[in-house]
């Protein structure tokens, strides 16, 4: 078993296998993917579909001299196995040893770290241009999926590739699925191409000025080898459109394409359960809201999984749900248009992907004051790939003029904000969905609030969306918190009380894009030290705004959050220690201050 | 003269004109555009080409009930004349009274402020979706140019429009030009459509699932009225492809399409002369650099005007220049690919447009450490439309992990940085091209440097790209400056010296994305007040980083820069006063500090 796979340390070894044995290798690779992903979690369906095409790629082309670039790159498992990293998939002792994306730090066969989508055509175009300028002669091959094709950047890349006038090969993997089913007008055209075996004159790729070839069965390794041999060393740009089956060879994955796109093992599922329940909270709320108001519409840009837009919920929504394809820029402008038209859009998006619409948030949404709601999931500190870091949303959204940015700490605050945001007609609103579910009661308990304070506490007040909340009144030291960092603040406050007899105050900065100036000026009078806590990168973030606000005063400001880096699969406890993002770390810093 | 135009206060008045007289109206409108733009400056060519189509739009459709949305919106002059704002074009006393873009604050006929490109299809899609959810019945019409079609967001919008299943009309204005000549593979397809009068089966729009109709002469008002009448109230999405002549009716504009795209009157030209000469400095340097190294390649995303990439220079570059179309996301990924491939890309871009590639800067460029150079023009405080504000580049680039961000103050620093950046192979670099040309000698003079200091001063040192420059040593108060704000700092320092006998130091923060910690710690020892000056929005900017750095110390930090707003055509002196961005403003703030 795994006899072929074990013999392959590099594509050179692969090339020594007689072509008629490649199907056996494919079988080994497929089994290794299934066995390992069911343990480690990962992108199951996309990789199962691309086994034969990847074997053919490395069988025909000469990497690393020839350049092979994977879009999104979550479909690179076979590539990793054929380039010296097989044991991470076929030896349980080494499972998880490599990341799920290409990474130049891992291998010279990996050219880029790609985790967002639709960028590889542009990257490949650049590599081809460099090759031509340097008078080199090798193939540049880009592996692009049909889901990625909906992203405008892929279109920009294809449109420009046509002008290269030299070798450039796009292997277009059409498995008729994005993460969820494909969305957009172009897919009917792809369907026509498949039905006509690539012969239809209606051909998006040719219309963009590209040569074109069709492979009926992209899971037939012989057909793939043959097709790639024909385009190797071609002297102009060409798209090789291959038809594959997502999840191929694993019946459950073939039948449940969306669920099998990316699977989580039981352990990960459990660890993430808390974050997943905000998906449920949102679904429950939106089900009622949308039924009551048919002008409320949920929007997603081709990635419904992380934001809780299940197939069942989408079906329930009917016309009140739109999947725009993998198109964050369009999605934000689309939401802006819906809001201007008088309906009530809610754009569900992962923190890391929202930044693709930075310009549209600044121009179409905020400058135009369109009252749309953006729900940001996956924001905060997670043990995740650098390409998907959740630590940049505050710096991305919080500095855009005209954008109201809310960070609830509790379930009650979240629902109050969401309800208010959908119905108000004055302003665009970003809501940072918390990482874990806590309730107002939890926070009160943590803050040791007396009855009087409990009474004073109220849910988010939409008539004053810049107002912050004092959850624990005190003096000398004040913790200003974003979202669920209120929990860390309460623990640090307790520790200070125990160790130094100080009674610090704790304040939730519910709106991290503007100041509650009355509250800040109160703080100024009764405090010496302000400590800010934010679940994201400090540079450009919330704490720095506070530091500027108090810069000309006697108050000392200590800011806690992330360094200017995108952490790559680092356990949270590890960097929390480095960042002093712990009660002990914070308290010892405060104690060490020279006042 | 202007008899028809003067009679039109709204589209209702237009509809009373017999159709056979519309050509006379078109003549009046065209003359008003020529007369006014030659005085005020503005987008000449695009508006001259769209006169008849716009008249037909308002003749056939019923705005404001029907929604007409202009992409980029710089081609809206006729629309403004027909919707109650004619005198801003046909009465010299009122020239310049309206802006050059659509603006809802000006008129209910203007639905959005659009200044960036390729967004209107998405906005229109949103308005159509809102209409359907609200069970309303009106037309949604988007006016899209062929240049804008190269932007991926337009593609995303068209792809999604196809799934609307209801009324949606894209008036596609094909004048065969972007700002410069069109770039990209799709334009050959458009050419084929024009040659076949829209009959070719190779049709990008149909491939995206959209209905399609062609109008041979989009400058024939009768043909336009006829075509639009046929699509009015249509029950599905359709593209009406019209063929027009950019600059129509003004021979110089017809012949010099790029120069006539946007013209500046003499007064504006003179006021901007200093900024334009950095374009010349860059051209002179790059001419030599590119000749010496054939792997250096200049890139631009469809907007060569503001960055000095003249037609002559582009021609001189040959294969060492690439216009990617209006595709900032692609352009940054493309540059990343070129750098990874071993060649030396320099992406020229206007500050306001760079933000469209925020995600690509974070992911493809910086996370992948691709040594590309981005030259940012038009950054800083200008009296310009809010959609084109140059005040967001520092907050956009300066917080991205792994991006080196340089802000030269002088010609010598700029050239040293540019030369270093192109040749180094370690890191992606953003260089903020200064607003006005000053030299090292100018700064020395302004800073009253003695001979010893002059000797110590050196050009930017690439082996320490995080090192800052002390241009005036001193004590107690330190000015930390970005780019040409060093000039303001020197003047404020002089004033402090005169008025209070203090000798402040002045430091250029050459790299605004990282700290010269050795220098900052020196400052800490010998200063009480740090004053930061930056030509951009303070929120998320440089000053806040300094405030955080010194937050836990006794040092007071005062930050000067822009408020969190996109200023709309406000004279610089006006907001400099409001922002205290003057020597007097700063000094009086310092004098008022309670230490």
Image (cartoon, coloured by chain):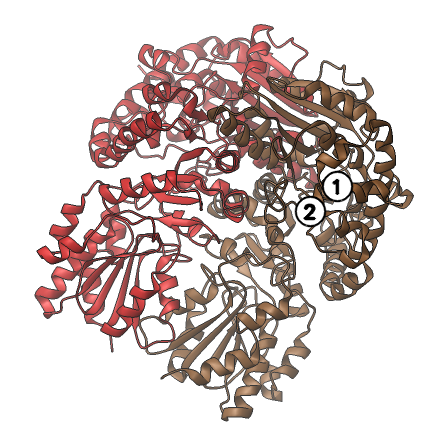
Chain colours: A brown, B red
Relative side of A173 to B195, left or right: right
Relative side of A218 to B350, left or right: right
Is residue A296 visible in the rendered structure shown here?
no
| Residue B275 screen position, x and y as percent | 25, 36
In the image as oriented, which residue stretches furthest toward the top?
B196
| Residue A292 screen position, x and y as percent | 74, 53
* Image quadrant in which the C terminus of chain B is located: bottom left
Q: Quadrant of residue A510?
A: bottom right
Residue contact at pointers 2 and 1, CB within 8 angstroms: yes
Output the chain of dot 2.
Answer: A
**Vertical position of residue A404 compared to residue B376: above or below:** below
Number of numbered callouts drawn = 2
**Vertical position of residue A468 compared to residue A305: above or below:** below
Residue at numbered disc 2:
A297
Relative side of B23 to B316, left or right: right
| Residue A173 screen position, x and y as percent | 74, 31
Is residue A286 visible in the rendered structure shown here?
yes
* Image quadrant in which the N terminus of chain B is located: top left
- Find residue B485 and name its label: none
**Label 2 residue SS:** strand
**Label 1 residue SS:** helix
The one of B353 and B27 positioned closer to us in this rendering: B353
Residue at numbered disc 1:
A319
**Vertical position of residue B525 compared to residue B272: above or below:** below
Tell me the CA gap for discs 2 and 1.
8 Å
The one of A234 and A383 positioned closer to us in this rendering: A234
Mark 1 crowdedness (10 Å alpha carbons): few <14, some 14-19, many ≥20: some
- Which label's residue is closer to the chain start, 2 or 1? 2
| Residue A465 screen position, x and y as percent | 52, 64
Q: Image point 72% across, 27% down: which residue?
A: A60
């Amino acid at each position: 078993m795994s006899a072929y796979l074990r013999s392959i340390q590099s594509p050179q070894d692969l090339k020594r296998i007689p072509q008629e044995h490649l199907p056996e290798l494919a079988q080994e690779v497929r089994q290794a993917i299934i066995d390992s992903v069911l343990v480690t979690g990962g992108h199951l369906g996309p990789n199962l579909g691309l086994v034969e095409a990847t074997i053919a790629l490395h069988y025909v082309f000469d990497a690393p001299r020839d350049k092979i670039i994977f879009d999104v790159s979550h479909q690179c498992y076979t590539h990793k196995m054929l380039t010296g990293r097989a044991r991470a998939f076929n030896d349980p002792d080494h499972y998880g040893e490599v990341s799920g994306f290409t990474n130049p730090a891992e291998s010279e066969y990996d050219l880029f770290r790609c985790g967002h989508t639709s960028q590889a055509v542009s990257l490949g175009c650049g590599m081809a241009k460099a090759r031509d300028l340097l008078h080199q002669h090798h193939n540049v091959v880009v592996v692009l999926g049909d889901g990625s094709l909906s992203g405008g950047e892929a279109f920009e890349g294809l449109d420009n590739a046509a002008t290269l006038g030299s070798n450039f090969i796009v292997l277009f993997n059409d498995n008729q699925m994005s993460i969820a089913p494909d969305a957009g007008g172009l897919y009917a055209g792809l369907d026509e191409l498949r039905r006509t075996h690539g012969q239809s004159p209606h051909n998006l790729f040719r219309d963009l000025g590209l040569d074109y070839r069709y492979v009926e069965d992209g899971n037939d390794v012989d057909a793939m080898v043959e097709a790639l041999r024909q385009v190797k060393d071609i002297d102009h740009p060409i798209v090789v459109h291959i038809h594959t089956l997502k999840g191929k060879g694993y019946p459950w994955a073939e039948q449940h394409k969306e669920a099998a796109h990316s699977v989580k093992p039981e352990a990960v599922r459990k660890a993430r359960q808390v974050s997943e329940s905000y998906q449920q909270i949102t679904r429950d709320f939106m089900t009622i809201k949308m039924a009551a108001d048919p002008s409320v519409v949920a929007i997603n840009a081709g990635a419904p999984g992380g934001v809780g837009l299940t197939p069942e919920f989408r079906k329930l929504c009917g016309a009140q749900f739109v999947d725009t394809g993998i198109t964050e820029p369009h999605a934000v402008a689309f939401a802006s248009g819906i809001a201007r038209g008088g309906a009530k859009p809610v754009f569900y998006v992962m923190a890391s992907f929202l930044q693709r619409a930075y310009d549209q948030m600044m121009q179409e949404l905020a400058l135009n004051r369109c009252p749309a709601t953006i729900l940001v999931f996956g924001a905060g500190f997670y043990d995740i790939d650098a390409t998907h870091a959740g630590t940049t949303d505050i710096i991305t959204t919080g500095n855009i003029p005209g954008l109201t940015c809310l960070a609830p700490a509790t379930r009650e605050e979240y629902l109050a904000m969401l309800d208010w945001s959908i119905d108000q007609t004055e302003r665009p609103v970003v809501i940072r969905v918390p990482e874990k579910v806590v309730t107002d009661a939890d926070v009160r308990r943590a803050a040791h609030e007396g009855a009087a304070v409990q009474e004073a506490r109220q849910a988010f007040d939409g008539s004053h969306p810049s107002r912050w909340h004092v959850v624990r009144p005190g003096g000398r030291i004040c913790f200003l918190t974003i979202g669920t960092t209120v929990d860390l603040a309460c623990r640090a406050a307790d520790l200070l009380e125990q160790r130094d007899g100080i009674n610090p105050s704790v304040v939730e900065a519910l709106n991290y894009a503007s100041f509650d100036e009355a509250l800040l000026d109160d703080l100024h009078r009764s405090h010496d030290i302000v400590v800010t806590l934010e679940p994201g990168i400090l540079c450009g973030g919330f704490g720095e705004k506070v530091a500027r606000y108090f810069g000309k005063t006697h108050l000392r400001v200590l800011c806690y959050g992330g360094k200017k880096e995108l952490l790559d699969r680092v356990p949270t406890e590890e960097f929390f220690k480095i960042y002093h993002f712990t009660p002990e770390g914070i308290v010892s810093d405060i104690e060490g201050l020279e006042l």
